[in-house]
Amino acid sequence: MIKKEILNQLRSQESPNSVSIYIPTDLTGDYQANRIRWKNACSEALQVLENKGVEKTSFLKPAMDLIDNMDFWAHQSAGLAGFYSENHHSHHHLLHKHDLLTIVDNTFHLSLLLQEIVNQDRIFVLAISQQEVRFFEAVNSGIYPVLISDVVPANMEVALYLDIDGNSVQSHSAGGATQFHGNDSGQDKENIRLKQYFRSVDTGLLEFIHDEKVPLVLAAVEEYYPMYKEITEYNYFSPHMITGNPENLSPADIRKQLDPVFKEFHDQRVNTFVDDYNAKSQESLTIDGMLQLSEYAKNKNIDTMLVCQSHWNSMSKDEKKKFDELLFSVYDQGGDIIITPSENHECDTLHAIKRY
């Protein structure tokens, strides 16, 4: 999962001969294919540096060291990106497959990383029971576990440190968690415990996703939904849920149940844009094409833009460089970027709605 902090850190890096590498990776099957793609990309980067007359290439050692790390290649997602310079080195797992790409420039090539963030065809899933908490990020191509154990309690017992004595409840906690005592009925007591548990989970989870606009779907027994909805402070809690004991559901089971949710959210978002675009076109508040969008982006006058993936893929290298600048300009001014496949909409150009 690419967080905005990671993207901002990479954007702040500027160094001659900065190397950006993107490869598609396979989750299952022949792990050698992943390794070979990376090895070839590293070789290409070294060749480009050599052709430029760069003698000091030791900054690529962290990338080269990954080549023979077989355990690393056995644990991949849909894609992998790496960024290497004299001042920085890092690699990041991606949720979407991207074409092989190796670029050497004065800054890192980051529009594909930005796509990971702005692509709203993503769904968060919180699978919660009294025994465990799991968190996933789902995209059209699959579903991936996200490590949240450093901010979220592992289960209800860890969250509340409960001692149960007959019909009384005594909560002992560390770090300032709420304490309560009482002799309520069994069901009231259970509801109090559950809400306290959910609040602890939600508070930790918000540290991780507070700046996201991605729907959060709850996977839990049905009676948990209204309680979690009542306590959550996340603004994009979904009306959809996956019912049943999530302990019995594999990630693949969860992802399968999200298909109608993906379609509904995406169609709703694109149809809203199309309706707004058609209405605003009567008021001369719409613009089309790279040139127009770039001019209006300079004046922070783009509210929403629609990008068709096939049109993006078909751009020339020079067009993609200009498009990168446009994307980051819209992103920085807080505009919405909608990415859609080509089969449902005209994709021969870019479309946007102006703010004024």
Image (cartoon, rainbow, N blue to C red):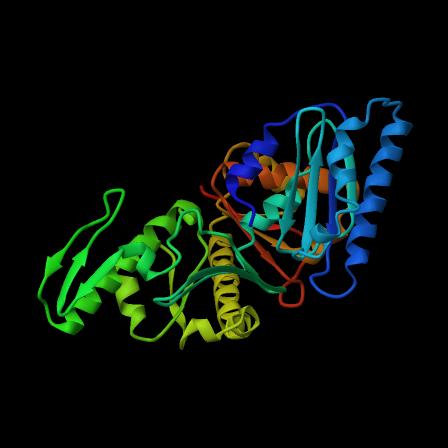
Residue drawn at the location 21% of the way across and 60% of the way down: 163
Residue 325 rendering spot, x and y as whole percentages? 64, 36
Of 55 and 8, nearer the camera is 55
Residue drawn at the location 45% of the way across and 71% of the way down: 247
Count of numbered circles on the image: 0
Residue drawn at the location 62% of the way across and 67% of the way down: 344
Residue 100 rendering spot, x and y as whole percentages? 78, 49
Q: Quadrant of residue 104?
A: top right
Residue drawn at the location 46% of the way across and 51% of the way down: 148
In the image, taking residue 36 as reference, residue 200 lies left or right, namely: left
Residue 157 rendering spot, x and y as whole percentages? 31, 60
Residue 316 rendering spot, x and y as whole percentages? 79, 45
In the image, taking residue 266 as reference, residue 318 lies left or right, namely: right
Which quarter shows the C terminus?
top left
Q: Which residue lies furthest to the front in this view?
A: 165
Q: Residue furthest left?
A: 183
Above or below — where is 355 with respect to 197? Answer: above
In the image, taking residue 99 as reference, residue 187 lies left or right, namely: left
In the image, taking residue 182 as reference, residue 84 lies left or right, namely: right
Above or below — where is 106 with respect to 7? Answer: above
Of 101 and 322, nearer the camera is 101
Q: Is residue 131 visible?
A: yes
Above or below — where is 190 with respect to 146? Answer: below
Of 252 and 269, nearer the camera is 252
Of 73 and 111, nearer the camera is 73
Q: Can residue 296 be seen in this view?
A: no
Q: Quadrant of residue 76?
A: bottom right
